[in-house]
Amino acid sequence: MTAATHRSAEEIGRTERGPREVPPLGAQRAAAELSHVDTTLANGLRVLAVRKDTVPLVELRLSIPFAGTDPLHPATAEVLAETIVTGTARRDRVAIDTELALIGGELSTVVDPERLAVSASALASGLPTLLDVLADLLTEASYVDAEVARESARLIERLAIARTQPRTIAREALQRRRYGNHPVTREVPEAEDVAKVDPAAVRQLHANAVLPRNSTLVIVGDVDPEQVVADLERALGGWASDKSANVLPDLPELTGGDVLLVPRPGAVQSQLRLSAQALRRTDPRYAHLQLANLAYGGYFSSRLVENIREDKGYTYSAHSGFEFTGNTATLLVDADTATDVTAAALLETRYELARLGLVPPTADEVESVRQYAIGSLGISTSSQTGLAGQLSALAQTGLGFEWLAGHPERLAAVTAEEVAEAALDFFAPHRFTGVVVGDADTIGRGLEAVGGVTVGEA
Amino acid sequence: MAVPELHRFKLDNGLRVVLAPDPTAPVVGVAVHYDVGFRSEPEGRTGFAHLFEHLMFQGSESLEKLAHFRHVQSSGGTFNGSTHPDYTDYYEVLPAAALERALFLEADRMRAPKLTQENLANQIDVVKEEIRLNVLNRPYGGFPWILLPPVLYSTFANAHNGYGDFVDLEQATLDDCAAFFDTFYAPANAVLTVAGDFEVDRARELVEKHFGDVPFRPAPPRRSFAEPRPTEELRGFHSDPRAPLPALAVGYRMPDPVGELDAYLANLVLAGVLTDGDGSRLQQRLVHRDAIVTDIGAGAGLFGPFEARDPDTFSITAIHAPDVTGDRVLKAIDEEIDLLAATPPDERELAKVTARWVAGMHSEHDRMVSRTLALGSFELLYEDASLVHGLADRFAAVTADDVAAAAKALRPDSRAVLVVQPEQGGSK
């Protein structure tokens, strides 16, 4: 490739001195304690405020339970999330953007079948403005007709794009496979429903559902937690209701079943998605199962990744992890694989599920996942955004800073036997259900041969 | 806030080192940036720099295949690597206790990576899956970073697909790998960055201990990728079998990111004025007033700023409705750019962009991984890691006239326009 002379690959791979020993780990210092407040405002909003002054910013996460059973709810909720920042009685869309920009601020909203989430950040010096804008949106969002019409039109165009994304197609198919017609399956609204949403319905949804009780707000940054709570009490005092935000009905318990083959003609890759019931964070065995999951497919050095990526080259990414919805938790295994090896990849994925229980993680594997779980938690919570995200997820399930602070200790206490038990109980292949999305003409025959596959409608 | 402390030095073998201590959390970041990206890969070997990045994780003299991953993760750390136009980076973020281990892992593969036929074949398969995932099986895959350069540029270095064509990838040989390593992966062609919770003297000792005996090899002479700017508007067309809506990308050449940094920064401010936030010029005009695009964005660098030397690309991208022509979108963009060139932005417009950018920099540097990578890439491309800390002031010093001048330089007769059309008007 170059004219210059170079060593051979073999010469490059060795030195005179030969292989060296990997150095041992040094002593680890504990993370600094962070001052924090966990309280509930007069309006029923739970607030978690933490001082973390690594940079002069503040991160805010508001989460409002936002379930609904109306057939048009997903579309209306999506339009609401898109238009809540487009104007209030006091500010129009440009004024909101300008005020936020001048304090280095960003504010975004996203909705799913469970929650409406507002994420915001700003220079810490701009916190009063940020809270004022937030309060304005929560209490005075106006949803003027023209903005609703325009955002609905944009949303319809975005939905067209989303519905061509393989991951979206696979996600919708998996949700239907797992939960039938439960409201949790309606993550992406139908374009024709969005077209039917009228501004009055959005305003009504806001009045009925954007409510402080049952909601959580996390603030992390260069702030005084006590002061922040007082500021919030003042800023959000006008956001009040006797009603509580709408919590998603419990999900049905997952039972195992055939994988459903969902045809996507001409696809050059297939999406593999398997799922089974898991344990909540509050379960005494949660840490056991967390480590078992990491050993299976929860990090790069896992059995699944080493098998189907690093040994066989079937996939670029394979992963397994927890999904937390309301009071339930599930395991989700995903991999995107080349069309011609899809059935083989499913076979190996199931093989590793069974093997995790039957040939449980060794002491070395358990130590590795334990250190990874503890270390990566410390890394992810070392930034304001990471800490705010973690705390927001915990706050939504009633947990708080103490759970986070105590989790390394729980992980440290897990024994190899406990990991093995969790693996046997929760990773048995028959507990899983799921979908494979791909070119049925090419992958169908192999999948039928592997077995445990149904072809047909979700 | 105080400006963070930085220590910069060079080992005898030419390795440049940046130490950035910060005791606020017991975490360290370690990165090695090699001065080679996909613009340097040879003709007929598209995608090679990225494929080689994969191979650097596949074992070294002291570490069997998979051992690198296991050592990082079983120390509680995370890792990755990425290939850019002008550099390739490798990095770990770990609990502070694992600093020496991370340095060892990076040194071992800089000294003696184990390049084998088996790993090469395996990683060609993995990279092909990566390309299927991110490009071939996805609507707008590779838009605009793969699709726009061949319209704007004419030389192989600047125009080719950095992910690579399958045919080229499959033809990569072990000898190609050996030549690439010996040419580009010399310590004198790299920067080591260590950021986070450590004692400076101790870190310096550990760096010497593990990297000191990586033998010197000369860094390759740095190639220029310069090519003339277009002298007319260049047009390209791409038919996307999976895209549901048409899209447009406009590419312009920019000031030299290194040699003309202030003019480059003016282009970053310009991008903010054009598309950052609901009150920005192009959002206002095309999304809200004319309502002809779903989304629009502008930016310097096809992956973001500060990741390439000259030539670098300023791009504007839009996805629009089928009943709107690309030329109508283009005309509206041109009118807004002309307006900005003729009437500079007001103070508040600039203050908005600056405040958001400063907050964004703080946020980015609050994450250990981003901070470590920024220090390393600035040391490599600008020969000055400390520039990272001075950028906010330089950015804030950009004037309205500078922005107007940058807008004026986005000339219709010296740009590339890429039109993406859905194939047969639909998608699967």
Image (spheres, coloured by chain):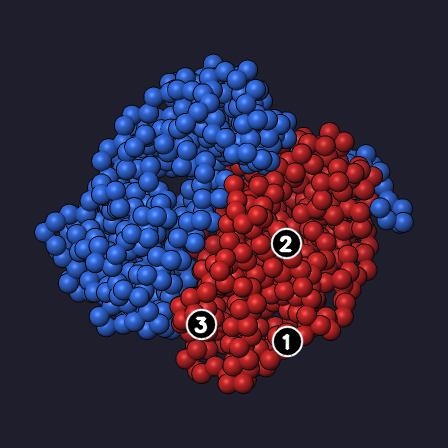
Chain colours: A blue, B red
Q: Left or right: B240 with respect to B383?
A: left
Q: Nearer the viewer, residue A262 or A62?
A: A262
Q: Identify the subunit bearing mark 2.
A: B
Q: Identify the subunit bearing mark 3.
A: B
Q: Secondary structure at mark 3?
A: helix
Neighbours of disc 2 within 10 Å: few (<14), some (14-19), many (20+) = some
In the rendered image, the vertical position of residue A322 relative to residue B146, given as above or below: above
- Kind of residue sitting beneath label 1: Arg
In percent of width and height, residue A228 lies at: 24, 61
Tell me if label 1 and label 2 are in contact, CB under 8 Å. no
Q: CA distance from mark 3 to mark 1?
A: 20 Å
Q: Which mark, by number, is residue B411?
A: 1
Q: Which mark, by number, is residue B285?
A: 3
Res A291 → quadrant: top left
Q: Left or right: A75 with respect to A158?
A: left
Res A141 → quadrant: bottom left
Q: Nearer the viewer, residue A353 or B271?
A: B271
Q: Secondary structure at mark 1?
A: loop
- Kind of residue sitting beneath label 2: His
Point 60% across, 32% down: residue = A338
Q: Identify the subunit bearing mark 1.
A: B
Does label 3 lie on the same chain as label 2?
yes
Q: Left or right: B156 with respect to A232?
A: right
In the rendered image, which residue does mark 2 sit on? B238
In the rendered image, the vertical position of residue B352 relative to residue B141, given as above or below: below
Tell me if label 3 and label 1 are in contact, CB under 8 Å. no
- Kind of residue sitting beneath label 3: Arg
- Report the number of discs: 3
Q: Nearer the viewer, residue A354 or B277?
A: B277
